[in-house]
Image (spheres, grey):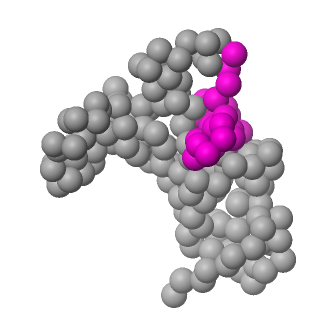
């Protein structure tokens, strides 16, 4: 059975009857003022033999995309937050920083990139490509060491220590 809770993360522990086998935290951290603050709460929400599915906006991919577009001034100023109507998160995460923050409480068991090449393709190639071909190739390269870190999002499956 699945339990869905819609609440601010600061209130989640108050609704906890027992830890969960699986907690999904997808596209949340990058919108928080202090992303690391939620990690101890997530640890309490996950059962000792449970899983945390963590997906977050990858700062490395944003840097790479800006390099490809020639947005050097933006890179020099380290202005990565979305502007105006942009859906770019306010705080894209550096995966090395997040790994260090997870270090003492979590073991990252699996790492995958999400959208490792599609977003870098020229529009005309995106328009011509078959969806099934795109999905097949994204799945084929999502864990490849040379490409996983380029994913727009990174997806990590974590176990509590």
Q: Can residue 94 be seen?
A: yes
Residue pictured at 20% horizontal, 53% vertical: 131
Q: Quadrant of residue 160?
A: bottom right
Q: Is residue 53 left or right of residue 37?
A: left
Which residues are the magenta region?
A: 77-104
Residue in front for this viewpoint, 50 or 56: 56
Q: Position of residue 53 (x, y in %)?
A: 53, 58
Residue that protrudes farthest toward the front in the picture: 84
Determine the main secondary structure of the stretch shown in magenta: loop
Q: Is residue 15 above or below residue 34?
A: below
Residue in front for this viewpoint, 150 or 40: 150
Residue pictured at 28% horizontal, 31% vertical: 122
Q: Give the total number of marks visible in the rendering.
A: 0
Q: Is residue 18 above or below residue 104?
A: below
Residue in front for this viewpoint, 76 or 100: 76
Q: Is residue 116 left or right of residue 34?
A: left
Would you say residue 87 sits in the magenta stretch?
yes
Q: Quadrant of residue 58?
A: top right
Q: Can residue 103 be seen?
A: no
Q: Is residue 128 above or below residue 38?
A: above
Q: Position of residue 102 (x, y in %)?
A: 67, 43
Residue pictured at 46% horizontal, 26% vertical: 65
Q: Quadrant of residue 42?
A: bottom right
Q: Position of residue 133 (x, y in %)?
A: 16, 48
Q: Is residue 76 left or right of residue 26?
A: right
Q: Is residue 26 above or below residue 154?
A: below
Residue pictured at 24% horizontal, 51% vertical: 135
Would you say residue 38 sits in the magenta stretch?
no
Q: Position of residue 117 (x, y in %)?
A: 32, 35
């Amino acid at each position: 059975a699945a339990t869905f809770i819609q609440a601010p993360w600061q209130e989640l522990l108050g609704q906890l009857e027992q830890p969960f086998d699986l907690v999904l935290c997808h596209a949340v951290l990058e919108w928080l003022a202090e992303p690391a603050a939620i990690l101890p709460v997530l640890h309490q929400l996950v059962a000792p033999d449970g899983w945390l599915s963590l997906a977050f906006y990858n700062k490395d991919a944003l840097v790479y995309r800006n390099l490809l577009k020639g947005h050097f001034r933006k890179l020099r100023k380290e202005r990565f937050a979305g502007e105006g109507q942009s859906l770019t998160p306010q705080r894209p995460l550096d995966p090395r920083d997040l790994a260090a923050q997870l270090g003492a409480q979590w073991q990252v068991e699996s790492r995958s990139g999400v959208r490792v090449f599609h977003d870098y393709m020229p529009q005309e190639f995106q328009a011509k490509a078959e969806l099934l071909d795109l999905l097949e190739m994204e799945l084929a390269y999502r864990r490849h060491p040379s490409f996983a870190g380029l994913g727009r999002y990174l997806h990590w499956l974590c176990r509590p220590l």
